[in-house]
């Protein structure tokens, strides 16, 4: 539990800073260029999922599960997985640029963009792998603290560039965002090596088989889930253009702010459920879900007010077209916060088929409505598809959770004073244990 309380605040800072940098890029680069950057980010994430083979979740689960996997062994597997993933990407990216004259992620013919994409993908892989490694060693607070401090320093420099020479951000937006990911990731990896001085250990066939069996289901779930989440970007780009993608991407980034805390909690739940000193109970997890939904309902209204102000007083006028899709999306994103947290519980207890079936349901629903609505309504159709699909998926996950927690559907939405008391008691114990 103390991982939840001491680790997530730093990750929130890092995520918010990333949002602010992307918001600044959106303002200075315009909707079309911001749409291109968004497609690069989406394509990189998709390729990372495929080439990562679900190893991120396997690293966390095996590291926290038992004594058979030492820090050195987990480090060795992390390095191997990252090296294979990067090597595969480098080969495909280089061959694609040589023979097709286009970058792999954004389809640009600019050599500077090619190297920018290489730097971004490298940082993305290092970030994902070493965050998982830190989490597996119950060092969530440490790694999130590192990336939040580094990102804050980078934001300071970006603001100086904005004041002195804003054109640099406009013309080098991809490099700005790439370095924002790469530098914290590199420092995260470097700090782990310096602090723990790990040594390479051979991975046996049995251990590799255990990693692979866990990773395979996670990989399938991740691919399906990602297609569900970001197929709308691809379809909008196919039927319209990068300008429309940019408008929709900014609206999506506003809506995704509701997923910052649930997403971080989902990553911290598996270590907390396995923490021998202060194990997170099922009752406490249910309370976290209820409090999260209650708090984010309030935050949703605040988000709408903030987004409205930013649309009107900061971003170029073109982006305001995304405000209506944002309003449509928010209820679905809000409801889905429960699914995000419960997915961490199912992953920690190796109930991966629940997450897999939920991902399939979400993917089928959202693709169906995307295909039906986007050609006619553009990003408004994508927003409607999100609302319907996320709601359907959450209902399914809650139904499956009832079997594990022995609670009714109504109880999950009936918040009580005892939920807050239970949470505050754990905070007090955490402070006392420091």
Image: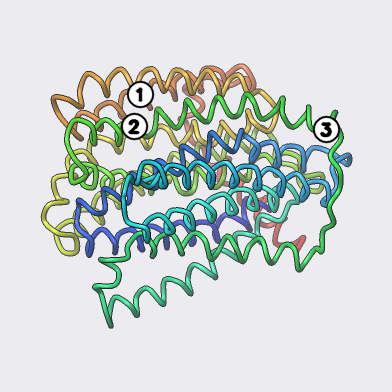
Q: Residue furthest front?
A: 99
Q: Position of residue 225 (x, y in %)?
A: 47, 29
Q: Position of residue 198 (x, y in %)?
A: 82, 58
Badge 2: few (under 14), some or many (20 or more) residues near its Cα, within 10 Å? Answer: many
Relative to 86, does residue 52 appear above or below in the rendering? above
Badge 3: few (under 14), some or many (20 or more) residues near its Cα, within 10 Å? Answer: some
Q: Which element carries disc 1, helix, strand or loop?
A: helix
- Whichever of callouts 1 and 3 sits on the residue coming sooner in the sequence is 3
Spatial CA span between label 1 and label 3: 37 Å
Q: Is residue 92 left or right of residue 208?
A: left
Q: Are marks 3 and 2 in contact (CB under 8 Å)?
A: no
Q: Which residue is mark 1?
A: 389
Hey, which quadrant is residue 272 in on the image?
top right
Q: Which residue is mark 3?
A: 207
- Whichever of callouts 1 and 2 sits on the residue coming sooner in the sequence is 2
Q: Residue at x 62, y 34 (%)?
A: 54
Q: Which residue is mark 2?
A: 332
Residue 374 shows in the view: yes
Q: Are marks 1 and 2 in contact (CB under 8 Å)?
A: yes
Q: Nearer the viewer, mark 1 or mark 2?
A: 1
- Whichever of callouts 3 and 2 sits on the residue coming sooner in the sequence is 3
Q: Position of residue 10 (x, y in %)?
A: 55, 61
Q: Position of residue 430 (x, y in %)?
A: 71, 57
Image quadrant containing the C terminus:
bottom right
Spatial CA span between label 3 and label 2: 40 Å
Q: Which element carries disc 3, helix, strand or loop?
A: helix
Relative to 231, does residue 322 appear above or below in the rendering? below
């Amino acid at each position: 539990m103390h991982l939840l309380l001491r680790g997530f605040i730093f990750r929130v800072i890092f995520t918010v800073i990333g949002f602010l940098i992307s918001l600044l890029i959106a303002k200075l680069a315009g909707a079309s260029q911001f749409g291109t950057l968004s497609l690069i980010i989406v394509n990189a994430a998709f390729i990372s999922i495929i080439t990562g083979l679900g190893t991120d979740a396997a690293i966390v689960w095996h590291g926290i599960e038992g004594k058979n996997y030492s820090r050195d062994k987990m480090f060795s597997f992390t390095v191997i997985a990252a090296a294979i993933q990067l090597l595969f990407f480098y080969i495909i990216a280089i061959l694609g640029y040589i023979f097709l004259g286009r970058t792999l992620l954004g389809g640009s013919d600019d050599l500077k963009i090619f190297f920018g994409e290489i730097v971004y993908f490298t940082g993305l892989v290092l970030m994902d792998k070493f965050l998982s490694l830190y989490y597996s060693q119950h060092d969530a607070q440490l790694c999130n603290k590192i990336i939040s401090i580094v990102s804050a320093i980078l934001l300071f420099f970006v603001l100086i560039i904005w004041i002195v020479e804003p054109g640099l951000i406009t013309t080098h937006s991809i490099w700005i965002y790439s370095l924002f990911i790469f530098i914290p990731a590199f420092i995260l990896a470097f700090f782990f090596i310096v602090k723990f001085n790990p040594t390479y250990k051979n991975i046996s066939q049995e251990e590799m088989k255990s990693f692979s069996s866990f990773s395979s289901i996670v990989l399938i779930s991740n691919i399906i889930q990602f297609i569900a989440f970001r197929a709308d970007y691809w379809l909008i780009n196919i039927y319209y253009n990068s300008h429309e993608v940019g408008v929709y991407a900014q609206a999506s980034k506003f809506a995704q702010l509701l997923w910052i805390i649930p997403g971080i909690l989902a990553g911290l739940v598996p270590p907390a459920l396995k923490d021998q000193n202060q194990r997170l109970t099922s009752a406490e997890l249910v309370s976290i879900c209820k409090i999260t939904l209650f708090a984010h309902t309030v935050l949703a209204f605040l988000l709408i007010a903030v987004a409205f102000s930013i649309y009107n007083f900061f971003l170029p006028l073109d982006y305001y077209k995304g405000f209506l899709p944002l309003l449509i999306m928010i209820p679905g994103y809000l409801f889905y916060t429960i699914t995000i947290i419960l997915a961490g519980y199912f992953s920690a207890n190796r109930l991966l088929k629940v997450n897999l079936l939920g991902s399939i349901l979400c993917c089928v629903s959202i693709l169906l409505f995307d295909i039906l609505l986007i050609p006619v309504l553009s990003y408004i159709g994508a927003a409607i598809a999100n609302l319907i699909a996320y709601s359907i998926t959450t209902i399914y996950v809650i139904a499956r959770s009832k079997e594990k927690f022995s609670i009714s559907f109504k109880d999950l939405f009936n918040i009580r004073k005892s939920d807050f008391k239970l949470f505050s008691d754990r905070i007090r114990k955490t402070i006392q244990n420091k």
